[in-house]
Image (cartoon, rainbow, N blue to C red):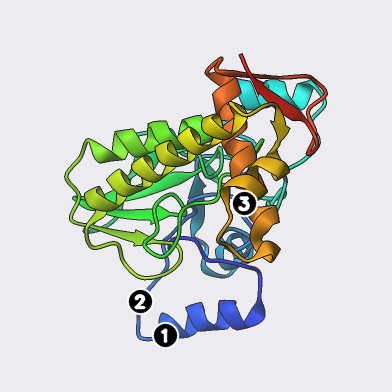
Amino acid sequence: MIDPGPDLDDHLNAILTATENGSQITHILVTHAHIDHSPLAARLSAITGAKIYAFGRAKDGQSDFMRQVEENGYTGGGEGIDHDFIPDVFLADGDQIVGKDWTVTALHTPGHMANHLCFAVGNALFSGDHVMEWATSMVSPPDGDLGDFMTSCARLGRQNWSIFYPGHGDCVRSPNERISWLVAHRRQREAEILTALAQGPNSARKLAEMIYTEIDQTLIPAATRNVFAHLLDLANKHMILFDNPLSAETVFRLR
């Protein structure tokens, strides 16, 4: 079982019903500690006796830069995090989980979240929220890190994959093409932000309003989070500056 999901009775019953034909849940794998992926793992483990495997707790794997951002006083982020999640078995990058007739390799792919894992079975990948077909992955600092996301994409892109099974939506049937598109999309957004900053210092929200001119205005808060992730990545790459303490109203400027 990969990502049992939210701790809901209906969800649990659906999983147990699906295994009534003699199947047995022997391992519970969790890609990351978001509330739509991990909370049911504990109750399912108690019922089935299966151990829970994951990279670690919600904050495990957090980049040094994002840790510094929090230490400098930033208090945002934290959306949808399962802070109570603790696996039975902590997986390191490259660890293998071996069953009777299968082997799963854990790949640490931080970006969407610090403790995010993908699970490889041959050339197929259970990609969690890192790569999806229907949408780009949300990266919300300080729990997510765009620099880590791009590094994880580059790593996955070096292997020739046959198919991805994401945590949401349909299968990704051309995974390497999808990874290339995601990287190009992020680079284009970065270029747009730098162009906007060339007109003068500005906040993440104002930049989002300048760049996302064709979306419903109710989506501007989500767009702002996306721009904010890019801004912190640019700051980490020493391309822009901001003054601490960091907040939603912080003004960023080119070096």
Considering depth in this image, is 243 or 65 the residue closer to the camera? 243
Q: Residues within 10 Å of mark 2 (few under 14, many from 20)?
A: few
Say what amino acid the circle numbered 3 marks.
Answer: Ala
Which residue position holds label 2? Answer: 23
Quote the CA–CA distance across marks 2 and 3.
43 Å
Q: Are marks 2 and 1 in contact (CB under 8 Å)?
A: yes
Could one spot residue 145 in this view of the protein? no
Residue ID at (23%, 48%) = 176
The image's mark for residue 58 is none
Q: For this view, does 175 lie left or right of residue 150? A: left
Task: Indicate whether 192 appears above or below 19.
Answer: above
Q: CA distance from mark 2 to mark 1?
A: 7 Å
Disc nearest the viewer among 3 and 1: 3
SS for dot 1: loop
Asked if residue 18 is positioned above or below residue 187 in the image, the reply reads: below
Locate residue 35: give its quadrant.
bottom right
Q: Is residue 177 left or right of residue 117?
A: left
Say what amino acid the circle numbered 1 marks: Glu
* Residue type at the position of mark 2: Ser
Residue 20's label in the rendered image is 1
Which quarter of the rendered picture does the C terminus lie within? top right
* Residue located at (32% from left, 48% from top): 181
Residue 213 in picture, x, y percent from top left: 58, 55
Residue 223: assigned label: 3
**Which residue is pictured at 38% across the width and 53% down the height?**
127
Q: Quadrant of the image for the N terminus?
A: bottom left
Left or right, residue 219 beside residue 52: right
Q: Secondary structure at mark 3?
A: helix
